[in-house]
Image: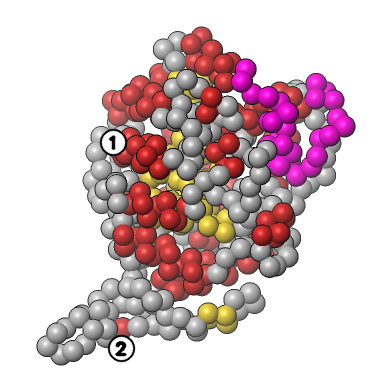
C-alpha cells in the first residue's frame, strides 16, 4: 500500500529569531553565534520529528542587517557541529554558486553527509546582492547569467558526487587493495564556466547525493528547481498565490521528465501562537512595538532592490523598476502592498516580521487549520517554520500545534528512517550507467 501523504516540516533556524525584534522578547535568547542555543533548538526540532533544520546564509554583513544575520557562524562548520549533537534530523545549509567552486562545495557537503550518516542537504543560491562582489575578486553577474552559472555548477557537483562506486573501497588487507581502480570515475568536465577534472577525494556519501534545495521563484529560478531540486522553498502570501506557484513548479518538474511527487514544495511561514486570537495578536503587537521603522526600512529596501529615501513613509509604495537583485521577492512585496493598500511604513513592518513570508496569527487550532488547508488544496507539501523568537517560539509551536497535526494523521509521530531522503520519501540516486 502507498503510504499516506504527510506534511514535511523544516525549521528555519535563525538565532536571533525571525521577527526583527524577536531577540527583544523576554523569553528570547539572542545570538546566531550562540552555539548552546542553536544546539538546544536543533534538538527541540528533532524531538518534534522535523524533517530538517535549515540555515540561511549571506556573504556580506552590516549593522543594519537583520539581527540574525549581522554576525553568525559559517553554516557548513555549524552543520558539522550539529551533526555531533543530533541523530535523525536533516541538516540543510545555504551555499552560493556565484561565489564558490564546485569541487570545494561537493567535498564539504559529502563530508557532512558522512559525518551525519546521511542527513545533509544543500540549499542552492545564486547570491542576489551585487555588493557581495566587494568581498571577492570578481564582478557580480546579471540575474539570468547567475542562474546559467548555477546550473553548470550543480551539474559539476552532482558529477563529483558520483566519483566512486559505493563499493570502491574494499580495504582488503590480504590483497593490499585499498581502493579499486575499476570503480573510480573521472569527471573531466570542461564547460562554459567551469573546468573540473575530478575525482572527488571522498567516498560516495550515505545518501549518494545530499538532498538538493532551491528557493528561487523567478522563471529561471523555477527552472533550476524543476531540473535539480528535491525541495523547493518559496515565499507566498495567500492560498491562491501558493496554489499558482505549486502548479507552475510541478508542471515544470514534469517537463524535465521528473516525477512531480518527488519534489516537495515548502513555503516559509511565521506562526504566532496564542491560547486565543487576542493573545496571539498581542504578541505580534508587542514585537512590532519594539520595531523601529528606521531599522526595518533597510530590510525592505534590500528586498525591493531600491532606496526609498525621499518617499513619504505613510504614503503608498511607489512604482519601481524591476530589480536585478531579489526579483521574485520584490514582485511579491509589491503585489502585497497593492492588494492590501499598505503604506511604506506598514510594508516595512511586514518585512520586519516575516520578510515576505506568510504569517499565521492565532490559536494552535487556527494554525493547524491553515496548514492543513494549504497542504490538502495544492499549495504546499510542507512548511519551513519561522518562529519569531527562539527558543520559546519553537517550543510553543511544538507543544501546541504539532500534536494537533499528529492527531489528524497529517504529521509523523516518529521517524521511520535514518536519512533525510528517508524522511522525504526519496530514493537514493543510482550511479549513471
Residue at the spot of label 1: 47
Q: Residue at 55% of width from left, 69% of height from top? A: 101
Counting from the top left corner in percent of width and height, residue 211 is at: 41, 57
In this orientation, which residue lies closer to the viewer: 286 or 126?
A: 286
- What crowding class fits label 1: few (fewer than 14 Cα within 10 Å), some (14-19), or many (20 or more)? some
The local secondary structure at tag 1 comes to helix
Question: Does residue 432 appear in this view?
Answer: no
Within 10 angstroms of label 2, few (less than 14), some, or many (20 or more) residues?
A: few
Q: Nearer the viewer, residue 428 or 182?
A: 182
Which residue is at 55% across, 49% downward?
A: 57
Residue 368 appears at what percent x and percent y? 41, 24
Q: Quadrant of residue 319?
A: top right
Q: Secondary structure at mark 2?
A: helix
Q: How is the image coloured?
A: secondary structure
In the picture shown, does residue 44 fall above or below 125?
above
Looking at the image, residue 321 lies above or below residue 76: above
Q: Disc 2 marks which residue?
A: 181
Q: Can you tell which mark lies on residue 20? A: none
Magenta extent: 288-315
Residue in front for this viewpoint, 337 or 129: 129
- The magenta stretch spans residue 400: no
Residue located at (46% from left, 81% from top): 198
Could you say where residue 339 lies in the image, as x and y percent from the top left?
72, 26
Residue 185 visible in image: yes
Amino acid at each position: 500500500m502507498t503510504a499516506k501523504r504527510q506534511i514535511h516540516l523544516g525549521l528555519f533556524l535563525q538565532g536571533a529569531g525571525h521577527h526583527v525584534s524577536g531577540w527583544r522578547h523576554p523569553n528570547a535568547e539572542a545570538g546566531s553565534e550562540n552555539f548552546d542555543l542553536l544546539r538546544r533548538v536543533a534538538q527541540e526540532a528533532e524531538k518534534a520529528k522535523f524533517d530538517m533544520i535549515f540555515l540561511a546564509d549571506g556573504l556580506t554583513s552590516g549593522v543594519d542587517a537583520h539581527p540574525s544575520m549581522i554576525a553568525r557562524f559559517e553554516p557548513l562548520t555549524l552543520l558539522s557541529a550539529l551533526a555531533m549533537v543530533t541523530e535523525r534530523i536533516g541538516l540543510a545549509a545555504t551555499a552560493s554558486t556565484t561565489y564558490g567552486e564546485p569541487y570545494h562545495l561537493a567535498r564539504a557537503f559529502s563530508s557532512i553527509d558522512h559525518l551525519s550518516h546521511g542527513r545533509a542537504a544543500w540549499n542552492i543560491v545564486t547570491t542576489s546582492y551585487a555588493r557581495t562582489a566587494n568581498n571577492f575578486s570578481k564582478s557580480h553577474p546579471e540575474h539570468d547569467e547567475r542562474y546559467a552559472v548555477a546550473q553548470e555548477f550543480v551539474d559539476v557537483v552532482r558529477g563529483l558526487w558520483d566519483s566512486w562506486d559505493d563499493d570502491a573501497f574494499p580495504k582488503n588487507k590480504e590483497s593490499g587493495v585499498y581502493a579499486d581502480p575499476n570503480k573510480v570515475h573521472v569527471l573531466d568536465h570542461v564547460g562554459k564556466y567551469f573546468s573540473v577534472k575530478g575525482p572527488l577525494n571522498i567516498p560516495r556519501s550515505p545518501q549518494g547525493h545530499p538532498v538538493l534545495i532551491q528557493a528561487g521563484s523567478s522563471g529561471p529560478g523555477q527552472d533550476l528547481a524543476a531540473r535539480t531540486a528535491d525541495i523547493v522553498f518559496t515565499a507566498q502570501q495567500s492560498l491562491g498565490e501558493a496554489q499558482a506557484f505549486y502548479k507552475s513548479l510541478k508542471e515544470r518538474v514534469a517537463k524535465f521528465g521528473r516525477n512531480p511527487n518527488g519534489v516537495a514544495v515548502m513555503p516559509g511561514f511565521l506562526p504566532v501562537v496564542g491560547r486565543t486570537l487576542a493573545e496571539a495578536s498581542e504578541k505580534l503587537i508587542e514585537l512590532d512595538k519594539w520595531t523601529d521603522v528606521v531599522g526595518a526600512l533597510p530590510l525592505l529596501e534590500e528586498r525591493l532592490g531600491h532606496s526609498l529615501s525621499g518617499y513619504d513613509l505613510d504614503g503608498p509604495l511607489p512604482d519601481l523598476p524591476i530589480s536585478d537583485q531579489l526579483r521574485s521577492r520584490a514582485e511579491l512585496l509589491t503585489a502585497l502592498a497593492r492588494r492590501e493598500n499598505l503604506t511604506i511604513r506598514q510594508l516595512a513592518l511586514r518585512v520586519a516580521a516575516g520578510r515576505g513570508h506568510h504569517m499565521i496569527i492565532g490559536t494552535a487550532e487556527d494554525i493547524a487549520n491553515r496548514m492543513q488547508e494549504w497542504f490538502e488544496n495544492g499549495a504546499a507539501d510542507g512548511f519551513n517554520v519561522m518562529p519569531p523568537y527562539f527558543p520559546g517560539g519553537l517550543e510553543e509551536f511544538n507543544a501546541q500545534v504539532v500534536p494537533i497535526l499528529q492527531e489528524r494523521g497529517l504529521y509523523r509521530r516518529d521517524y521511520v528512517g535514518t536519512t533525510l531522503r528517508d524522511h522525504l520519501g526519496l530514493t537514493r540516486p543510482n550511479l549513471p550507467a
